Amino acid sequence: MFRKLKIELILINLILTGLVLITIFSGIYVLMERSFERSSYMHMTKTSEMEDIPPPPEHPNRELISSENFFIKTDKIGRIKETSSNFTLSEEVSYNIIKNIFNNKDPRGTIIYESFNFRYLKVPKKYGFIIIFQDKSFDSEVLRRLIIISVLVCIASLILVFIISLFLANTSLKPIINAWKKQQSFVADASHELRTPLAVITTNLDIVLDNKNETVEAQGKWLGNIKLETARMTKLIEELLFLARSDSYEASLSISSFNLSNAIIQSIIPFEATFIKYKIHTSYDIQQNVIFSGNEGRIKQLAAILIDNAIKHTYEKGSIDIKMHTIKNKIEFTVSDTGEGIPEEHLDKIFERFYKVDKSRSNRNGNFGLGLSIAKSIVNEYKGNITVSSALGKGSMFKVILPFN
């Protein structure tokens, strides 16, 4: 698919470049041809007024330097009276040329006879006519060379454009190909994640249906599994919808000024029971009364994602440190833990959708690998930045930088 698109892009560039070059060189050719013609007729007109044409000086390359002129004087019915001495034609050739000119009502034009190719200008005189001829060999040679040069320039230009187009096509299509691959992977991962809870729900429903005579209380275990997997699937769908809205810029947010310090503290409170359960030591350093303009719900969601991520990857009796301070015109929010850490090769992929460092553990924790992607999406909405630093076996620190307003 992308190979065909690349070929189409290159062909379009080559065709457009070819058309432009053909237009330019055709214009140059026409202008030069008309310029030669106009100059020739002006010269022939002046020559006809002089009634005398001196022979051109001898030159080794005379045919490439000057067009050769000669004249024939005739009476009013076309009988030859005099021929210029600088160009010799046989009587038969002269007669046929004059005959053709008199048969043509146009007083000027081009006459081709055997190997002769001339412009002519027929000017009436008292005695009849004087017909001025000018050899076109010089003009024809210049125009022929122009065509050769134009063709060579076109070929060289098209080769250059092909190379540049190939490079640009590869460069411009690379992010599109990557986005397409990510989309394909996203769809595959989403399908896989949805398939698991659906399979569990189907299995438990089959057990319930196989025991129709049992009471609801007796089948509470299977119904509980169905409820749990339904909740997991609902969470997954909500996260997918959030990311879809973020990608399409359809998420409409209500913006207002709120106390950021209180919002972060309120995001921590729901996790206190989890801290106690796993004996996780927590420390807070939250600057008080920081007023921020944005969507309070999104900021709370961002804080909750980072805290929840820290809990899931911190050992029992570990510690989590949460800080928020203003630095110049920016807000710095960090969540650090003493957990397992992240291998260096995973750091640049940690914010990708459905990416999991330890897939088996993530599945047990009910983690779909979307939380950090959502966190990055929220930070991007505020034109902020989120980074992670980690040491394997020592822990990780997620840092969020948000500009004021």
Image (cartoon, helix red, strand yellow):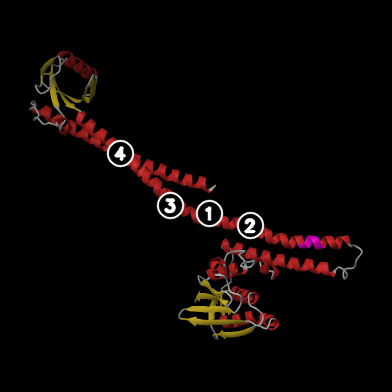
Looking at the image, is mark 3 or mark 2 earlier in the sequence?
Answer: 3
Q: Find the magenta span and give its range.
A: 200-204
* Residue at figure coordinates x 68%, y 59% from the top left: 192
Looking at the image, is mark 3 or mark 1 earlier in the sequence?
Answer: 3
Give me the C-alpha separation between circle 2 and circle 4: 53 Å
Between label 4 and label 3, give the one nearer the viewer: 3
- The crowd level at tag 4 (other Cα within 10 Å; few <14, some 14-19, many 20+) is some
The answer to which image quadrant residue 90 occupies is top left
Give me the C-alpha separation between circle 4 and circle 3: 26 Å
Marker disc for residue 187 = 2
* Residue at figure coordinates x 12%, y 27% from the top left: 48
* Residue 301 percent across, percent down from the top left: 62, 74
Give me the C-alpha separation between circle 3 and circle 1: 14 Å
- The crowd level at tag 1 (other Cα within 10 Å; few <14, some 14-19, many 20+) is few
Give me the C-alpha separation between circle 4 and circle 1: 38 Å
Looking at the image, is mark 4 or mark 3 earlier in the sequence?
Answer: 4
| Label 3 with label 2: CB-CB less than 8 Å | no
Q: Nearer the viewer, residue 232 or 242?
A: 232
Q: Is label 3 in a helix, a strand or a loop?
A: helix
The type of residue carrying mark 3 is Leu
- The crowd level at tag 2 (other Cα within 10 Å; few <14, some 14-19, many 20+) is few
The answer to which image quadrant residue 300 occupies is bottom right
Prevailing secondary structure of the magenta residues: helix
* Residue 82 percent across, percent down from the top left: 10, 18
* Residue 264 percent across, percent down from the top left: 60, 80
- The crowd level at tag 3 (other Cα within 10 Å; few <14, some 14-19, many 20+) is some
Q: Nearer the viewer, residue 31 or 281?
A: 281
Marker disc for residue 177 = 1
Residue 163 showing in the rendered view: yes
Instruction: Tell me: 193 left or right of 330.
Output: right
Looking at the image, is mark 2 or mark 4 earlier in the sequence?
Answer: 4
Judging by the rendered image, the residue that carries numbered circle 3 is 168
